[in-house]
Amino acid sequence: MTELFNPLIASLRGKLVVSCQAYPGEPLRHPETMAQMALAAERGGAAAIRCQGLADISAIKGQVDVPVIGLWKEGHEGVYITPTLRHARACVNAGADIVAIDATSRPRPDGLTFADNVAPLHKHGALVMADCGSLDDALRAADAGADLIGTTLSGYTPDRPKTDGPDFELLAQIIEALPNHPVVCEGRIHTPEHAAAVIKAGAWCAVVGTAITHPTTITTWFRSAVEDAGKHA
């Protein structure tokens, strides 16, 4: 089946994608730092890098040889992952091979729909990853021509509860409904066992961010474990 897809999409099948993102106020918030993080992930075997912001996209594209999935977050509520066509085109111009876009039905700042973004981006030479929060989102994204369907927003919209780990239920629903579409599992993949499990469940690839590239969060996991153990020592 892989030969039916764009070669870039085909190259991600059964592979790990690493998300390298840091936000304002965080110690690692610098494009060069994110580019170094991305290069380290590539050397560890990442098949692609997902990253946020024009400066980071550009810096990372200049460091790695693997494809770059770019997005631009603006705001904290509603549609904030590449919220307008202007944001999406800017990601392409910064070097993104694939543009990740919120694919929910929520209103977008420019009044366009997810579907309105796909054709212009394809014409621009970019592929599109649909960040979905529900099966309905995924179905609409597939109809719109999205190249990758992701579970990225599961638990971050009112459609589904936030699971402790990956949303295996949503992953299974999308794979069953869209057997001929590459379905990416992203969100709360916190261990190698999680990553292996989503691939075994049929995910095209697994996107891991926090557990690899966010040391502040990883430190809190270890600190909590140590402190909890100390209470029972």
Image (cartoon, helix red, strand yellow):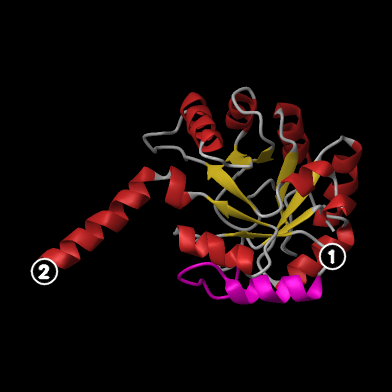
Mark 1 highlights which residue? Answer: 180
In this rendering, the label closer to the viewer, 2 or 1: 1
Instruction: Indicate the position of residue 169 as horizontal and vertical percent values.
Output: 62, 77
Instruction: Indicate the position of residue 159 as horizontal and vertical percent values.
Output: 63, 74
Q: Residue 2, relative to residue 24: is it above or below?
A: below
Instruction: Indicate the position of residue 145 as horizontal and vertical percent values.
Output: 87, 56
Q: Which residues are magenta?
A: 156-178
In the image, 54 versus 216, the foreground residue is 216
Q: Residue 196, relative to residue 175: is it above or below?
A: above
User: Please, what is the three-letter code of the amino acid marked with disc 1?
Assistant: Asn
79 within the magenta span: no
Mark 2 highlights which residue? Answer: 231
Which residue appears farthest toward the left when viewing the image?
233
User: Please, what is the three-letter code of the amino acid marked with disc 2?
Assistant: Lys
In the image, 154 versus 218, the foreground residue is 218
Residue 77, visible in the rendered structure = yes
Residue at 36 percent across and 51 percent down: it is 217
In what quadrant of the picture does the C terminus appear?
A: bottom left
Residue at 77 percent across and 59 percent down: it is 182
Q: Quadrant of residue 92?
A: top right
In-image side of 102 versus 111 (left or right): left
